Image (cartoon, grey):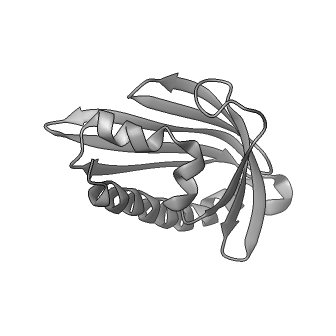
Amino acid sequence: MSSIVIEVTLSQSPPQVWDELRHIERHVQWMSDAVRIDFHGEQREGVGTSFDCLTRVGPFTTTDVMTITRWVEGAVMGVEHRGLFRGRGEFDLTPLGRGTRLTWREELHFPWWFAGPIGAWCARPVLRLIWRRNLQNLSRRLAADPS
């Protein structure tokens, strides 16, 4: 299993950050590893929202099957990964002065044929780098939004 925690401090308030984060279909605009999101039904937010995320990391492409498992309006979005890589992830927004601390936690299990725990250990620094860049992209996106 690979456990990764990344945090970023944003100048926007939690409601402002949530207004962007809640739009799952727009995550591809700031997540460099997310290529496309296809929802399984009409639901687009809240617990039970289910979708496929075409994900690309370097030469590797996979479809990450995800379901929102936790949704605390303005504060927390949790997801279960049920594709090739299984596990759980969560975005957590914490007020920090006038801004927000966004914490991204992921616990992923790698399949045995992808070297299992050894593959997870090797992938961890790469995933941390990608996800840190994703949060920087989100920060730039929020700073560019005039609202």
Outermost residue on the right side: it is: 113
Q: Does residue 6 appear to the left or right of 41 in the view shown?
A: left
Residue furthest to the left in view is 97
Residue 87 x %, y %: 67, 40
- Work out whether 117 lies above or below 136: above
Q: Residue furthest bottom?
A: 59
Residue located 15% across and 39% down the image = 98
Above or below for 85 versus 140: above
How many callouts does the rendering have? 0
At 24% from the left edge and 33% from the top edge, which residue is drawn? 95
- Nearest the viewer among 80 and 41 is 41
**Residue 86 percent coordinates (x, y):** 73, 43
Which residue is rendered at x = 33% and y = 62% of the image?
140
Any part of residue 8 in sight: yes
| Rendered position, 77 above or below 108 | above
Residue 115 visible at all: no
The image quadrant that residue 20 belongs to is top left
Give how far across and how far down residue 3 sits, in percent. 55, 47
Give the residue drawn at x 78%, y 55%.
Answer: 63
The picture places residue 111, in percent across and down from the top left corner, at 81, 52
